[in-house]
Amino acid sequence: MRLSGVVAFLRSISLGFVEIVSPRYCMVCGGHLSAAENMICGLCRAELPSTHYHRQPGNPMELRFKGYPTVERATAVFRYARSTPFARAIHDFKYNRYPSLAVELGREMGRRLLTTGYLSDIDIILPVPVHFIKRLHRGYNQSECLARGLADVTGIFIGHHLYARRPHRTQTGRTLEERRMNTENVFAVKRPEELIGKRVLILDDVCTTGSTFIACADALKKDVPGVKCVLLALAATEDQA
Ligand SMILES: [Zn+2]
């Protein structure tokens, strides 16, 4: 057997061993993953609810930001609907300590957008921050994990210029007005001089009313002359509730 054959044989044994000692399951359907699959099986990946908003100027997500001139364009890669397997997977990476699922979904977003040119003029990715107390409690910021996956595929740098000045409570179950008040002046910008004149990609997990994105864009507009904001969510609800 040639050396490459020996390596392939040993690799197949080791992957098989990993499968035996640590069975891996799809985070969407719960089905068994093959050695070549990571976090989400091929079938679920193909059936993720794409929006194709990036091809659609004036898409339903952009309508949330009408009247905000700092926001140049906005898209969400997937549709978010409660009680679906995909929504449960998002809940898992957000609350059930599966940050690697967020990284993988960040890669999936990158793969879907890379060839479209949607991100070709982006200077830097700015993940939506969480307050450091929440980050300590959760152990990670899911938007940073998404950004890591997106950066893996696109090669765009991640910036940590946005930060949360105070904890803001969950947006779930709040009215539009309550959400806006809840996020008003929460975010601020570190080292704003590094972002002057740049086109930044603000990245978040789920967009409902858009109030979190608006709060981030407002903070950037206030402190960074000439900044242009592009908004990207992993998923967006179809309505704004
Ligand atoms: Zn699956």
Image (cartoon, rainbow, N blue to C red):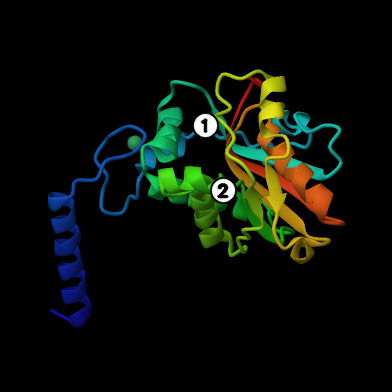
Q: Quadrant of ligand 1?
A: top left
Q: Which residue is mark 2?
A: 112
Which three-letter amino acid code belongs to the residue tagged 1?
Answer: Pro
For residue 165, above or below residue 177: below
State how far apart marks 1 and 2 are (Cα): 12 Å
Q: Earlier in the sequence, mark 1 or mark 2?
A: 1
For residue 149, above or below residue 9: above
Q: Position of residue 134 (x, y in %)?
A: 49, 42
SS at mark 2?
A: helix
- The residue depicted at 72 percent of the width and 21 percent of the height is 177
Q: Badge 1: few (under 14), some or many (20 or more) residues near its Cα, within 10 Å?
A: some
- The residue depicted at 77 percent of the width and 50 percent of the height is 220
Left-right relation of 17 to 215: left
- The residue depicted at 49 percent of the width and 21 percent of the height is 82
Left-right relation of 77 to 190: left
Q: Which residue is mark 1?
A: 49
Q: Badge 2: few (under 14), some or many (20 or more) residues near its Cα, within 10 Å?
A: some
Q: Is residue 118 visible?
A: no
Left-right relation of 11 to 131: left
For residue 57, above or below residue 82: below
Q: Nearer the viewer, residue 86 or 92?
A: 92
